[in-house]
Image (cartoon, rainbow, N blue to C red):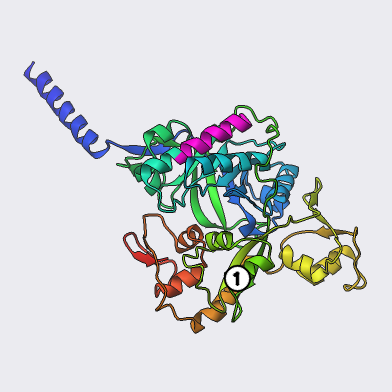
Amino acid sequence: MKNKLSKIIISFFIFTIASINYIYALSPQSELRYEGIDVSDWQGYIDYNQVKNSGIDIVYIKASQGSNIKDPYFDINYENAKANGLRVGFYHFLTATNIEEAERQARFFSSIISGKQSDCKLAMDYEQFNGVGREQINQIAMAFMQKVRELTKKQVIIYSDLYNSERTFSPELASQGELWLAYYGDYRNLQNVNASWNTFIGVQYTDRGVVPGIRGNVDRDLFSEEIFLDDNSEIPSNENPNGNYNTETIYYTVQRGDTLWAIARRYGTTIQEIAQINGIRNVNLIYPGEVLRIHTNSNIPGNESNATGKTFYTVRRGDTLWGIARRYGTTVQNLVSWNNIQNPNLIFPGQRLILYRNSGSNSSSRVSKNVNSNLSQTSYSNINYAQYTVQKGDSLWRIARRYRICPKRLARINGITNPYMIYPGLVLKV
């Protein structure tokens, strides 16, 4: 009897110690066995035939941002991913600061994906809070998710990093959608994590993935079975609440004497939109050599695809081979070769051109080159910056993307010589 009592006491003691050490945990809901990527216009044109052959199963495609920005590569990414047998999902980058705006963005997102077939649950990417408090953040997120479910009849999940899953998003919000976690550490060993979720159905484990068919880095993901929709029928038709949207992305190098007002007017957009996309806090302060990312008020026209994964472009009045090559991240020489063009100065409206893949310098590399050549001429001493404290799993590239600035610029203003050597607790100027 005494020995039995001793065993009970020891067992209780061990259980108590284990409970203290592992009160909280965040783990995959089931086996993470589906290889995935998530893409946007940052990747430019993608050869999905190569992507499929590399072992990728799922592609999450950015559809929209804010109230009126449609990702310029959304349609082409969707058509070519589907044509090559990949399973797709759609996500929206939420920027709302009140419930009314959240519902407007939900209607916009739903209109962009209308008529398309998603294999995976729709995703809300909400990571830019613009000074909104925690309670209101959760109300905004809830309003967006509820409206999207109402309009699309599809399930919605939440994309979040570890910090926000613990400290920002509430258990009430977590009950409305499963978690797609962004975490670049050991995602299988997240004990003592007091998040609003106990499990996740997907993990974005790096933002520096390399996949054949994609030029440059791409986010890599792993997903479990629960990522798939119960009903993957066509998304119902929904009217665009704005009547139009901005879709084409260009990169503009600021010249001496430029103002945001003049640049916005030139490209058919607004000062506010350029400022938001590029993380500009003072709209009166831009400098020569700065490279701005601009969504213009026009579609990328003529995008079509076929079952081979090739993409075609239909020439419009005023087009040049140089302009088309620049838009799709390839070269005039490639277009001439692929289309057997005898005179590169002679193309005509209605002509159908083959676009194989992104085999030249893409927009991102052009931006990096421009920024690298101009940063040394720029003084940062008179600029007021916000501050960001590096979290576990952060990378300089991801922080730069979050705040819509160039990674090289972020490194330069913080005196960082090795962009891979940042650490939790480091305070950055952004």
Task: State whether the magenta stretch is mostly helix, strand or loop.
Answer: helix
Magenta region includes residue 179: no
The answer to whether 221 is drawn above or below residue 270 in the figure is above
Is residue 364 found left or right of 20 in the rendered image? right
Question: Residue 271 location, x and y as percent?
Answer: 58, 63
Q: Quadrant of residue 83?
A: top right
Is residue 245 found left or right of 183 in the rendered image? right
Q: Residue at x 37, y 41 (%)?
A: 135
In the picture, which quadrant includes the N terminus? Answer: top left
Helix, strand or loop for disc 1: helix
In the picture, which quadrant includes the C terminus? Answer: bottom left
Q: Which residue is mark 1?
A: 367
The answer to whether 339 is drawn above or below residue 2 in the figure is below
- Residue extending farthest to the bottom is 377
Q: Which stretch did the figure color magenta?
A: 140-154
Q: Residue at x 31, y 60 (%)?
A: 425
Q: Residue at x 67, y 42 (%)?
A: 240
Q: Quadrant of residue 259?
A: bottom right
Query: Is residue 186 shown to the viewer in this render?
Result: yes
Query: Is residue 362 shown to the viewer in this render?
Result: no
Is residue 264 found left or right of 314 in the rendered image? left
Is residue 12 found left or right of 344 in the rendered image? left
Magenta region includes residue 152: yes
Name the amino acid type tagged 1: Val
